Amino acid sequence: MKNSKVSDCQMVDIRRYSDTRGYLSVVESGIDIPFDIKRIYYLYMVPEVARGAHAHKELQQLLIATSGSVDVIMDDGCEKKTFHLDKPWKGLLIPSGLWRDLEHFSGNAVLMCLASDGYNEHDYIRDY
Ligand code: TYD
């Protein structure tokens, strides 16, 4: 497992194209993000609860609030930093090995996660 730091998290601009018909954003492996996308999942209709509360040993992720807003609190054991995601053209690139809490989902929030691997419970660290 990599010992990443909060400072290794990166807010990235998602590539976007606009014309009179509106906006289109795209994320392509090897061009926009440094890993191959193996899985996509998304959280929505989240009530006033906190989610997340885990770290991943190997998984890398890009989180995008495609609608609404959410706070992602990243924690490496020494430093904590809150990233407010509220635009569909902004993403948070999360390297492996970092604790995250997800809080303050707005009512219309859709949080999409592009992940570097399939679902694997053995990759989770759930004990802070
Ligand atoms: P969970 O890890 O608790 O979500 P979060 O940490 O974002 O709050 O996942 C909720 C449920 O969904 C849990 O039963 C496992 C399942 N799940 C999958 O089957 N595949 C997946 O890719 C993910 C992310 C979760």
Image (cartoon, rainbow, N blue to C red):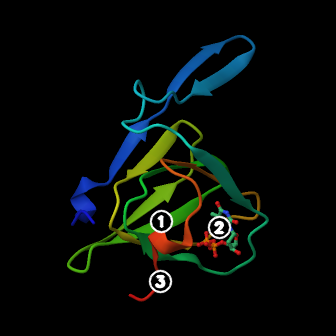
Residue 50: x percent and y percent? 60, 79
Badge 2 element: loop
Quick one: quadrant of the C terminus? Answer: bottom left
* Mark nearer the N terminus (1 vs 2): 1
* Residue 71 x %, y %: 51, 65
Q: Which residue is mark 3?
A: 126
Residue 12 seen in this snapshot: yes
* Residue type for callout 3: Arg
User: Which residue corresponds to the image point at 54% horizontal and 36% vertical from the top-left?
Assistant: 89
Ligand 1 position by quadrant: bottom right
Percent of width and height locating residue 78:
20, 79
Give the residue displayed 57% in from the left and 26% down from the top: 26
Whole-number angstrom distance, CA of label 1 to CA of label 2: 10 Å
**Residue furthest to the right:** 45
26 vs 60: above or below: above
- CA separation in Å, label 1 and label 3: 16 Å
Provide the residue designation for mark 2.
Answer: 105
Q: Position of residue 7 (x, y in %)?
A: 22, 58
Q: How many marks?
A: 3
Q: Quadrant of residue 5?
A: bottom left
Mark with earlier residue (3, 2): 2
Residue located 42% across and 72% down the image: 55
Residue flagged by tag 2: what amino acid is it?
Phe
The answer to whether the residue labelled 1 contacts the one labelled 3, judged by CB atoms less than 8 Å apart, is no
Name the disc covering residue 72, or none: 1
